[in-house]
Image: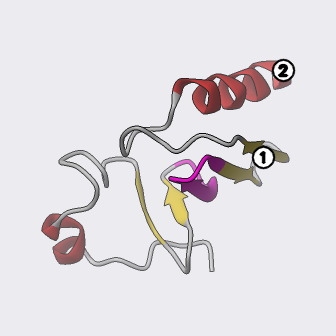
Amino acid sequence: MTTDQLTPEQKAYGGLGPDFFDHQSWSYCQSVRDTGAFGWDGGFGTTWLVDPVRDLVVIVLTQRMFDSPALPEPHASIQAAAYAALA
């Protein structure tokens, strides 16, 4: 459930931008990152991330839609702060 389910041909077909599949792919209803972390960035203002290697779970719930396919700054900052707290 947490492993890459796309072929290289499917990734070449595209995603939500030209670099979308550079460090992630799709599993069953979630993104899977090259680091082993997985989760979902929902365009309606929610994200969740599980990193089993670091025993970390980050959930961010907002009431603001994403402006682009990129992770919004508040979500990225909270995830970065969670990783920094482990150091």
Q: Residue at x 31, y 48 (%)?
A: 22
How is the protein colored in the picture? Answer: secondary structure
Q: Identify residue type, mark 2.
A: Ala
Q: Left or right: 7 with respect to 77?
A: left
Above/below status of 13 relative to 23? below
Residue 14: percent from left, percent from top: 19, 63
Q: Residue at x 54, y 24 (%)?
A: 73
Residue 83: percent from left, percent from top: 74, 28
Q: Identify residue type, mark 1.
A: Ile
Magenta highlight on residue 82? no
Tag 1, which secondary structure?
strand
Q: Which residue is mark 1?
A: 59
Per the rendered image, the range of residues in magenta is 35-46
Q: Relative to the observer, which residue lies in front, 30 or 23?
A: 30
Q: Relative to the observer, which residue lies in front, 24 or 58?
A: 58
Residue density around tag 1, few if under 14, some if 14–19, many if 20 or more, within 10 Å: some
Q: Alpha-carbon distance for marks 1 and 2?
A: 15 Å
Residue density around tag 2, few if under 14, some if 14–19, many if 20 or more, within 10 Å: few
Q: Which residue is mark 2?
A: 85
Above/below status of 53 relative to 27? above
